[in-house]
Amino acid sequence: MNLSDFQRALAHDYPEDSQSQAAVLIALVPIQSDWHIILIRRSDSQYRHSGEVALPGGLHEPIDDSLYTTALRESQEEVNLAPDIVTYLGQLPVTQTRWGMWVTPFVGAVPTNPSIKVNSAEVGDVFTVPISLLSNRFLLCDEWEYQGNVRRTPRFKHNQYAIWGFTAIVLQNFCRIALQRELDLDNCPVANCFTNDILAYSQWKRSAPNRT
């Protein structure tokens, strides 16, 4: 796919949602013959989402004139991704995290070998995954119960990194809309990791009640 293909696939008019409190950036970078997505692993010192894989992004601030500006500012703060090298391609539907926060994902392209510098206060690692990972061949899922119903959410594994929860759901939407590829959650292996991830966070939080 080239940039025009992405722009056509993402040519949806999503009005800015007043519920959205944060934004993330799906930054596409060309590496060899594939597009890759820049992902981060949150610093182990983070109060919430410690050690989790995420997309660059964060909370909307009064200085931001739009949620897209939020995504760019946070990406620069976290991995030194300069806003002026990002080519806007579109956005995805607003998505809710498991903690109840509404987040707007944006999609942009950056040149090969962008100058990445990790903000160690917020980020532990930065890495890329090829968009070819977003396929049924590599798809896992987490199965969990919510309000009496069993739900499945996507999960991917790339080297030592587990991509799950909100980030995996956003990538699923990117796969469906931008790549026009459906992921089959009904027929993929169940990883049975979701409960363990939530339990680990709950135990960590109980060890210091002031953590949020």
Image (spheres, rainbow, N blue to C red):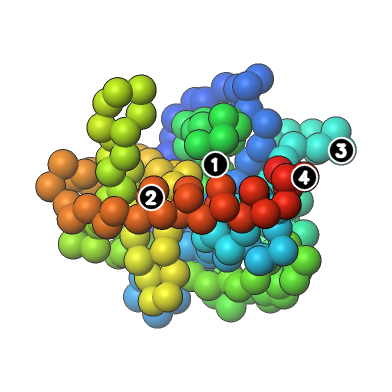
**Of the residues shown, which amino acid type is indicated by label 4?**
Asn
Q: CA distance from mark 3 to mark 2?
A: 36 Å
Mark sitting earlier along the chain (4/3): 3
Q: Are marks 4 and 3 in contact (CB under 8 Å)?
A: no
Instruction: Name the residue nearer the viewer: 172 or 109.
Output: 172
Q: Pointer 2: what residue?
A: 194
Query: Residue placed farthest to the front in the image?
Result: 207
Q: Earlier in the sequence, mark 4 or mark 2?
A: 2
Q: Tag 3: residue type?
A: Ile
Q: Secondary structure at mark 2?
A: helix
- Closest to the camera, between mark 4 and mark 2, is 4
Q: Position of residue 182 (x, y in %)?
A: 23, 43
The residue that disc 1 covers is 105
Q: Residue furthest right?
A: 63
Q: Secondary structure at mark 3?
A: loop
What amino acid is found at the position of numbered circle 2 in the picture? Phe
Question: Looking at the rendered structure, which numbered label has been put on residue 210?
Answer: 4
Measure how far apart labels 1 and 2 are at the Cα level.
22 Å
Count of number-bearing discs = 4
Give the mark nearer the N terminus: 4 vs 1.
1
Q: CA distance from mark 4 to mark 1?
A: 29 Å
